[in-house]
Amino acid sequence: YIKRDIVTQYKQTILGPLWYIIQPLLTTVMYMFVFGTLAGIGTDGIPQPLFYMAGITLWNYFSTCFTSCSDVFGANAGVFGKVYFPRLVVPLSSCTSNLIRMLIQLGMFIAIYIYYVVSGQFTPSLSVSLVFFPVLIVMIGLHSMSWGLLFSSWTTKYRDLKFLIQFGIQLFMYATPVIYPLSFAPEKYRWIININPLTPIFEAFKYSCLGAGTFDITGLLYSFCVLCATMFFAVIIFNRTEQRFMDTV
């Protein structure tokens, strides 16, 4: 499944896997112009390419994993109806294959990071929190998988949710500090953003590699508790749905 996801995603395309690099680069340039220049949103003193690339790299991983996991039953109905195997293998393989894509984009981010450090335009502010870097990536992947499993189970019966997912994931990005620092949000609305369990992960991600943002242990524990709860219910609902999904898909 992992090999299939990687091979088929850009099959019959001219540039192929180069889109892994082109897409975040073009998105970064667009964000620099729209949010950095036109809107004048600050980046906590971090060079705009580094700030936006850090957020885009992590967000792309979350959104692609969530989108693929949210259509597990619909996209694999043919296979599920013929052969029995643990259905959770499919969303797990999707998160793994998207992790490879994320690591490629992370490598590009590191290259840009090194350029800014060598050119003297950015002074690295690395801390001991950098050791949590892999943990943050795993947490964001599991969050996307648990939410995706819930929506995948619901969309087998309520097809309207597919349309909600398409634009809902785009709107949800603005409720997450991806293209803006949490410090930029007005104080009276900041609590709304803090309810988002992804907020402490993105803030810690940026803090660990850029020195911007915050590393809030309490927030990360809150995010972990939400993750455990959603994953627990997601697996239960997913297992129940797989027993009867062929009647509705």
Image (tube, rainbow, N blue to C red):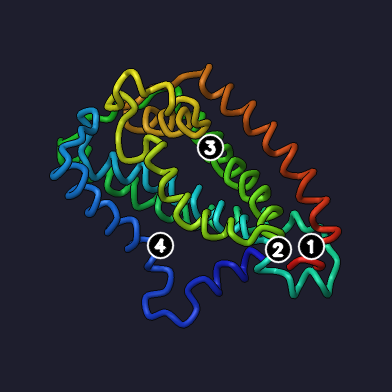
The N terminus is located in which quarter?
A: bottom right
Do the CB atoms of the residues marked 4 and 3 lie less than 8 Å apart? no
Q: Which residue is mark 1?
A: 245
Q: Residue at x 83, y 51 (%)?
A: 240
Q: Which mark is residue 51?
A: none
Residue 134 is marked as: 3
Amino acid of disc 2 = Phe
Query: Label 1 amino acid?
Result: Phe
Where residue 48 sits, quadrant-wise, is top left
- Return the x and y of residue 111 as percentages of the image width and height: 30, 49
Q: Nearer the viewer, residue 157 or 236?
A: 157
Measure the C-alpha gap from mark 1 to mark 4. Answer: 33 Å
Distance (Cα) linking label 3 and label 1: 35 Å
Name which of mark 1 and mark 4 comes first in the sequence: 4
Q: Which residue is mark 4?
A: 20
At label 4, the amino acid type is Tyr
Q: State if disc 1 and disc 2 touch (CB < 8 Å).
A: yes
Binning the other alpha carbons within 10 Å of mark 3 as few (below 14), some (14 to 19) or many (20 upward) gives few
- CA distance for labels 2 and 1: 7 Å
Please name the residue that numbered disc 2 is placed on: 73
Mark found first going from the N terminus, 4 or 3: 4
Residue 207 in the image: x percent, y percent?
37, 27
Circle 1 residues within 10 Å: few <14, some 14–19, many ≥20: some
Residue mark closest to the camera, 3 vs 2: 2
Query: Mark 3 or 1, which is nearer the eye?
Result: 1
